């Protein structure tokens, strides 16, 4: 199913004005950068307060 | 401007743009304002020219901050990822203390474990596939610890070596090899392995994602008890050729908190062995499920699972941004540009939801209705 896009029609001038306000506030909320895992993994284990998961060998 | 920093792919999803950067294999979600100004920046000859244009437009008093924000953003998106070096390590067969055999699609896999503790990293999730020792095996794996590192070998060739605390990386590599063996594929055939569990109704599938402890596996076990089939738990692989999610033969791992709920719903749940791998993870049971009719199904929805005690069951549409913020950092996604494009193509076809639940009957009904609705489209 092709989804509908619902972009606000905003001019470049408006975007620059808005961006100027964002930039003054360190641009929080305007973008995120997401990096996938570099290698395969199962669920990440929680920290092990009981010490090492495996004994020394 | 240095257009080599520009994103390789740009896609509009609702009111968000998703950009993909080849150099870093990173996905960036931005709003329309940011996109317009970013395009303007990339069209400009130099940073100074961009700032001068902003002044001419007369809508900002701080063009330098905007230019630096965009420059820093593009640099962050273009941080080169250096693949880890392949090291050559000869196998040490003196660690072959325990041998187990498993039958998968007519193939016999033999795994040598160095100890009972090492065995707990892989065996409990595959115990339902174990068979008596045979004279010959098709593939042999070795798993052992040496100098605080966990080694995984396949047919005496090193697959991975990780610090022993990062055992989940070794498990991940093993699962990828298991999936490849199951479906006669190689790693390069896959778009990615999503961190999430996938359920099918026999027509299509739904991918359930969420942070650890949000109830993905428990929900999938409940849905299996309600008549759905499990396609994959924890690691859900998507094939490039078909864009379908494929069967992962591992059993579902169930944490102790869900035992009381499931023992009344799942036949034989009490008889499953208790596994304690480490103190922080607590007790776990691995629940094997019968394989689905087909090995693969198209996935029509991604559902962010949110178990909340006493909450009423609620399925609501959420943004692709919210889903990707959970899915991407926890998944392996192929850096191949063809696969990245296929991933974006697939995202364009799926619906994204959040499912809050506590009641088991109504959640199964809600998922059933969703399958019905998505299969009609």
Image: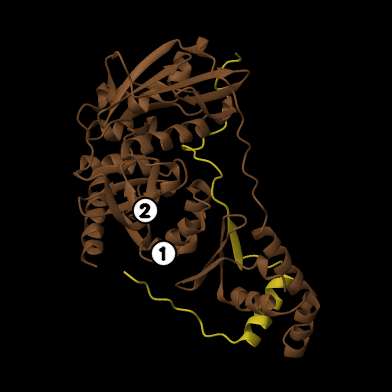
Chain colours: A yellow, B brown
| Point 61% across, 55% down: residue | B24
Few, some or many C-alpha atoms within 10 Å of disc 2 (few <14, some 14-19, many ≥20)? many
* Nearer-the-camera pick, B12 or B101: B101
**Would you say residue A45 is visible in this rendering?**
no
**Residue B197: x %, y % from top left:** 36, 44
**Residue B272: x %, y % from top left:** 28, 23
Q: Which residue is mark 2?
A: B356
**Residue B83: x %, y % from top left:** 62, 43
Apparent side of residue A33 relative to residue B238 in the rendered image (left or right): right
| Point 25% across, 35% down: residue | B289
- Number of marks present in the image shown: 2
Apparent side of residue B109 relative to residue B226 in the rendered image (left or right): right
Q: Are marks 2 and 1 on the same chain?
A: yes
**Residue B28: x %, y % from top left:** 57, 62
Q: Which residue is mark 1?
A: B345
* Nearer-the-camera pick, B93 or B215: B93
Q: Earlier in the sequence, mark 2 or mark 1?
A: 1
Q: Nearer the viewer, mark 2 or mark 1?
A: 1
């Amino acid at each position: 199913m092709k989804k509908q896009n619902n972009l606000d029609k905003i001019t470049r001038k408006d975007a620059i004005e808005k961006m100027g306000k964002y930039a003054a506030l360190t641009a929080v909320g305007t973008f995120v950068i997401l990096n996938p895992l570099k290698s395969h993994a199962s669920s990440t284990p929680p920290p092990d307060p009981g010490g090492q998961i495996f004994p020394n060998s | 401007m240095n257009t080599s920093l520009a994103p390789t792919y740009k896609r509009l999803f609702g009111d968000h743009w998703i950009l993909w950067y080849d150099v870093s294999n990173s996905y960036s979600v931005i709003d329309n304002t940011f996109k317009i100004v970013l395009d303007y920046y990339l069209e400009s000859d130099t940073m100074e020219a961009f700032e001068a244009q902003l002044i001419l437009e007369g809508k900002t008093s701080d063009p330098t901050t905007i230019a630096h924000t965009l420059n820093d953003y593009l640099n962050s998106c273009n941080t080169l990822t250096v693949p880890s070096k392949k090291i050559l390590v000869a196998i040490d067969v003196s660690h072959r203390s325990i041998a187990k055999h498993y039958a998968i699609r007519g193939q016999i896999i033999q795994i040598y474990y160095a100890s009972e503790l090492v065995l707990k990293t892989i065996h409990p999730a595959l115990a339902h596939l174990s068979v008596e020792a045979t004279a010959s095996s098709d593939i042999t794996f070795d798993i052992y610890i040496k100098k605080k590192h966990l080694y995984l070998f396949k047919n005496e060739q090193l697959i991975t070596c990780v610090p022993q605390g990062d055992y989940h990386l070794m498990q991940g590599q093993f699962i990828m090899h298991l999936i490849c063996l199951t479906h006669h594929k190689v790693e390069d055939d896959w778009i990615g392995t999503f961190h999430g569990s996938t359920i099918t109704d026999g027509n299509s599938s739904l991918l359930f994602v969420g942070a650890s402890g949000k109830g993905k596996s428990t929900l999938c076990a409940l849905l299996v008890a309600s008549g759905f089939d499990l396609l994959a738990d924890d690691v859900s692989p998507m094939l490039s050729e078909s864009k379908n999610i494929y069967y992962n033969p591992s059993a579902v791992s169930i944490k102790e908190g869900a035992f009381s709920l499931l023992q009344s719903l799942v036949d034989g749940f009490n008889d499953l062995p208790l596994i304690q791998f480490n103190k922080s993870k607590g007790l776990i049971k691995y629940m094997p499920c019968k394989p689905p009719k087909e090995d693969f199904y198209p996935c029509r929805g991604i559902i962010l699972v949110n178990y909340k005690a006493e909450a009423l069951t609620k399925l609501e549409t959420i943004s692709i941004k919210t889903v990707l913020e959970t899915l991407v950092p926890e998944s392996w996604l192929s850096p191949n540009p063809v696969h990245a494009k296929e991933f974006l193509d697939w995202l364009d076809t799926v619906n994204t939801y959040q499912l809050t639940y506590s009641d088991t009957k109504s959640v199964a009904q809600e998922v059933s209705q969703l399958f019905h609705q998505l299969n009609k489209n």
